[in-house]
Every structure is written in C-alpha cells, then in structure tokens.
Amino acid sequence: MTEFQRPRGTRDFGPEEMARRRFVEARLRSTAELFGFGEVMTPTFEDTALFVERSGEGIINEMYAFKDKGKRDIALRPELTAPVMRFYVNELQNRPKPVKAFYFGSVFRYERPQSGRYREFFQFGAELIGAPSMESDAEVIALALWSLESIGLKDTAVRIGNLDILKGLLGNIGITGEDQAACRRMIDKADFEGLAKHLDGLGVDRLKQRNLMDIIKTKGGKEAIAEARQLAGADIPGMDYLEGMLDKLAVYGFEKCNVDFAVARGLDYYTGMVFEIDSPCLGAEKQICGGGAYQLAELFGGETVNSTGYAFGFDRLMLALDNSGAQIPEPGLKAYIVPMGEAARMKALEILRMLRTANIPSDMDLMGRNISKALAYANSARAEKAIIIGEKELAEGSVTVRDMQSGEQTKYPMSDVLRGFLKGIF
Ligand code: AMP
C-alpha cells in the first residue's frame, strides 16, 4: 500500500487552524466592505499568456503552467491582479467609476519552499480601478493599514515610494529605457552592489552615483522627503505627491507612515505610487503586503484606466499574528452532553436539538464512553459546559451541569437547560 504525502510547498489545515484563518478572513472582508469594496472571484486557472503579458516571459518558470487536453497553454494563477483586470476589461468596464473590488483566493508559485514561502498560498487583495488621484492611492493604503488594525496585527511598517521619483533621479544622470528598468529592478532587490557595477558600466561618475545612493537610501517621515529634496538639489517630480500622501494618511489616522525611495516593485506596469508593508517579526520573508498604482487594462485590450491595488500574503498575516501573540478567539462548544444509558441518550438528543435550534454550538458523546473519558473529550473540544444525564438525573428530570474550567457541578431541572444558556446562568 502506498502512503501519500501532500505535495511539496502545500499545507493541510486542521479545524483549529481553519477557525483562526476564517476569523482573520472575516475581519479582512468586513473591513474591505466598510471601505465600499465588493468581492469578486475569478477562475483558479487562466491562459498562461495573461500572466506573461503582465509579468514577462520569466514568469513561466515560476508558475504551474501546462498544456491542457485541448493543447491550450494554461497556468494556475500566481497572483490575482491580472485575472481581476482581465475580468474588469471583459465585463466591468462600463460600470460607474471607480470600481472597488476585493478578492480572497489561493495562488500557486513554483518556488523553493521555506518558512513563509509556499507553492500554494493565499492572497487577500483589493483593486481600486478608474480613479486617477492621490486620494484613491491614499484610500487603498488606508484600507490596507485599517485591515491590519482590524486583525490586531500591531508591529508593522509601511514603506511608500514613488516610481516617478526613481525615474526622475535616474533620468537626471542620463539613464533611460531598458537600462533604467534594469536599475529599478536592482533597487527593488536592494542589490546596491550590482547597481554600482551597472552604473560604472554605463560610465556614470562616482559622485553622481553616491548622490543617487544617498537619496534612495533615505527613509522616514516628512523629514526624509525634505532631506531627499536637499540631496537632489533639483525639483524631482513625485516628491510633492508623496508629501501630500502622508498628509492624507494622517487624516485617516495613520500618522506613522514612512517614505522609502528604494521601493521599486519589480514590475514595469507600476506607474507612480508603490508601497510595501513588512512585519519585522517574520525575519527573511517579512513582506506581508505589496501594491501600488498601475496601468494594466490597456495591456489586456481595455481602455486606459488608472488603478491602485495591493495583495496581502494571507499566510504571512497568520504567521505574524502567531508570532506576535495576538489573541484570536478560539471557537469551541458551549455544551457537550454526556448521557449514561440508552434512555438518557434519547433525552440527550432532544436537548441537543433544542440547543442547536437556538444556535448554541453543542455536541454529544457518540462513542458510548464512560464519564471520565467523555469529559476528557469535552475538554479537547474546548466545551464550556458538560451536561451530564445519568440514571438519577433521568429519573428526576434533571441534568448535572459541569463547568469545564472550574470542575464545579450543579444540578438544574432539565427544562432549564436552554434558558440557562440563553440567559448566561450556566
Ligand atoms: P506579490 O504578488 O509577489 O507582490 O506578493 C504579495 C504578497 O504575497 C507578498 O507581500 C507576500 O506577503 C505574499 N507572498 C508572495 N510569495 C509568497 C509565497 N511563496 N508564499 C507565501 N506568501 C507569499
């Protein structure tokens, strides 16, 4: 007989973990709805070309891509922005703008698995389509930060950049086109050594290089913008925008946002504002969110439209919550009924039906266990109360209610069980 293991980079989730995940997911959902975003869902697989169009040929090596039986090139989605924008171009384009959409779904990447890096993982993201303004960019960052507050994740750091600034800085030292894109990719990966070599190769003098490095390594609040302005000497487009963005976010209640000129997001379709959020407690794989302003609809045959969006790595949110010891309520049973004997089992069923009808999470012993084993099971199911119906109780028309925390036991008339739970007497 063969014993099967799950494929590399995938995970199974047991009932306790699923309850925690669903709790966090529900909070993210309700926050997105609070901000006026509506949920969308797209297929798990798409034409491979959709992702190649968005991210370039290199993405093929990172995807689960294959030919289906009809010889079509298909890929399991590695992200959801391209599918959502494909859907937008196909069907949502004529809706009043802006279109505010959020999604939650599994994504697949053929990566080397490690802690916080999986081959199947989940993304919760939002896209605000068709509102080309600093206000819509701020709305999207605010939604991301509000979402983190809503799930109780405290130790996070947002870094906001602006590609117009990077483009301006590189343009000022004569780097354009494909060379500029290559430099931006190196900056995105914080490969400053590689960048220096590349700039040497392009003949950029060392003084200018130094100045560029100083600016892109500047981080912080408004003071960092002032510092970068001074270092740049000339007026760089995008600085005012970043400053305005920090002001807007402060009005949303997020005063501690930082700018980071080195945030470049590897992909070419990002247009202006870009941002990332880290949870430092996660170590190497600390990025929990990435996003920015982009133009993608026209690439998929739609009208040009400005959009801003982001994706949370949902699994990393869960890891960060675990690491930071955040409290997530653990669901458990309110009542676990322990009947002794056949007649008591029928009574137990009656009580169970009554409790469940009143939406009180409850269960009963199905194994015919003795009382101590049944109570041990009740404990493992995190039941608050055990309701014991022995022969004596049955004869008296009573039940013994045991508080599973304190072990205290009290007798109540059987007819009081429902009232006891509803009124919080038990
Ligand atoms: P990206 O679409 O690459 O910007 O990813 C968005 C978010 O997904 C990142 O900020 C990470 O939190 C998360 N993420 C990316 N790759 C993985 C992975 N292999 N496993 C788990 N989470 C990931």
Image: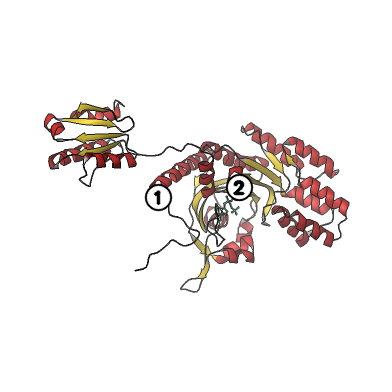
Give the quadrant of the C terminus: top left
Q: Which residue is mark 1?
A: 14
Would you place residue 250 above or below residue 18 in this image? above
User: Which of label 1 and label 2 is nearer to you?
Assistant: 2
Is the residue marked by circle 1 packed among few (<14), some (14-19), or many (20+) residues within 10 Å? few
Q: Is mark 1 within 8 Å of ligand 1?
A: no
Would you place residue 173 above or below residue 73 in this image? above
Give the quadrant of the N terminus: bottom left
Residue 76 locus on image (x, y percent): 51, 62
In the displayed structure image, the side of residue 92 where residue 58 appears, left or right: right
Q: Which numbered disc covers residue 2?
A: none
Q: Which numbered disc covers residue 283?
A: 2
The residue under label 1 is which amino acid type?
A: Gly
Q: Is residue 29 visible?
A: yes
Q: Quadrant of residue 202?
A: bottom right
The residue under label 2 is which amino acid type?
A: Gly
Q: Quadrant of residue 156?
A: top right
Q: Residue furthest left?
A: 395
Residue 408 locus on image (x, y percent): 28, 28
Would you place residue 207 above or below residue 77 in this image? above
Label 1 to label 2: alpha-carbon separation: 25 Å
N-term mark: 1 or 2: 1
